[in-house]
Amino acid sequence: MECAAKGIVEDPCASGANRRCGSCGAVAYCSKDHQFIHWKVHKEECARLATQMSRIDMLSQFPFTFSVEPHALNHTKRSMRCLFLESMKVHLKGLWKSGCMCGPDIASVKDLSITTEWNMESSLCPCTEPENPVPAPLASWEDYFQWRSLPLHSPVAVLLHWPLTLYHCLQLSRIQTSRYDGHDTLHIHYLGPEKELLQLAVFAELRALFPGVHLRIELVGPAVPRSRDGEVVNISSYPNCSGESCHCRSSIASENLNCSEVTLKIWKGLYHERYGDIDSNPHLILAPNAGVAAYPSWMPTIEMIRGIGVPAIFTDFCEEAAHLASCCISSITGQPLGLPIQVNPFRQPIAENNSALYIPCYSNGFVFGM
């Protein structure tokens, strides 16, 4: 944890930041002097951060029976995430290769569509079509796992938070997806993809979540390798399990007419710079883990989104990032958020490290929108 006064004090920090604020507990300091200096800044946020800290227990509650923490919190060489993936026997395998810092860099992967293996037995992963139609709506991980007949010790939510968050945002936007059955296409503009680019096969789950619907997703962001710009990925089947004789490895498994078609097209650049190159108008704009307040490049994008006039939903890791983003958005639009900040029930069930604050932090943790 870094000293909260770092960057606003002249003298360097003398030691580790072990002195936490006694009121909120969200920030820490290396010394009493640095805490005193920082108070002029922190006093404006202390009560707000205290409220966010009060939600730690609620945010850490998941229905899963696996545990991420054992033997990892005090481990100095291996991350908690690595040890968890190793315990599940999927570390650096298949879709899980980019699940931690040990995985490959996006630019080093020649084909973004090739990783299509769950590397676990069929009972633990959604490798085939669902047995029953999706109940409407799914409101929690527990609902999803029950529908997909998955045991709660399966770790697939660690990857499936990407498509399930998109599903949840479509529910929040009140878009009637049934209108896009048959020949119509539901267009989604997906902004700022990073880790998702190495896990594209997980978006196959949208086929089950939106049966009969053709989804066209334009993934636009600066993290896209230049060599991948314009690449199209068609998803017509689910990622395979490890069973050689499983039905998922049969071509017949993907020929059900009730399942949707998912097409992904990848664009390098900022949304406001590439929007004119995309040949479809969006029904929904989604920006996962956006970091609106952290990147000035979001400002012209938000200006443009306001002009497009379609639902635009953002997610972020922590509630404070969502709060700061809402302030930025409102300063541009002159209006409050159309979708207030709220907890995403389909957030990733492994906490993220936060070097600046002790507040709870999860990938796709909070949802809000224009």
Image: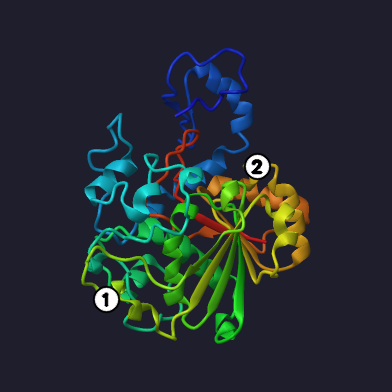
Residue tagged by mark 1?
Answer: 247
Q: Is residue 13 above or below residue 277?
A: above
Please report whichever mark, 1 or 2, sits nearer to the chain's N-terminal start: 1
Q: Is residue 187 above or below residue 155?
A: below
Instruction: Please tell me which residue lies in front, 224 or 68.
Output: 224
Is residue 56 visible in this depiction of the protein?
yes
Residue 198 tag number? none
Could you say whether the residue bearing mark 2 is in a helix, strand or loop?
loop
Q: Is residue 69 above or below residue 340?
A: above
Q: Position of residue 50 (x, y in %)?
A: 50, 42
| Amino acid type assigned to the residue bearing label 1 in the image | His
Give me the residue at 52% from left, 55% from top.
Answer: 366
Instruction: Please tell me which residue lies in front, 176 or 211.
Output: 211
Residue 295 tag number? 2
Instruction: Locate the N terminus and report the quarter of the image it occupies.
Output: top left
| Amino acid type assigned to the residue bearing label 2 in the image | Tyr
Q: Is residue 46 left or right of residue 113?
A: right
Disc 1 packing (10 Å; few <14; some 14–19; many ≥20): some
Q: Position of residue 321 (x, y in %)?
A: 57, 46
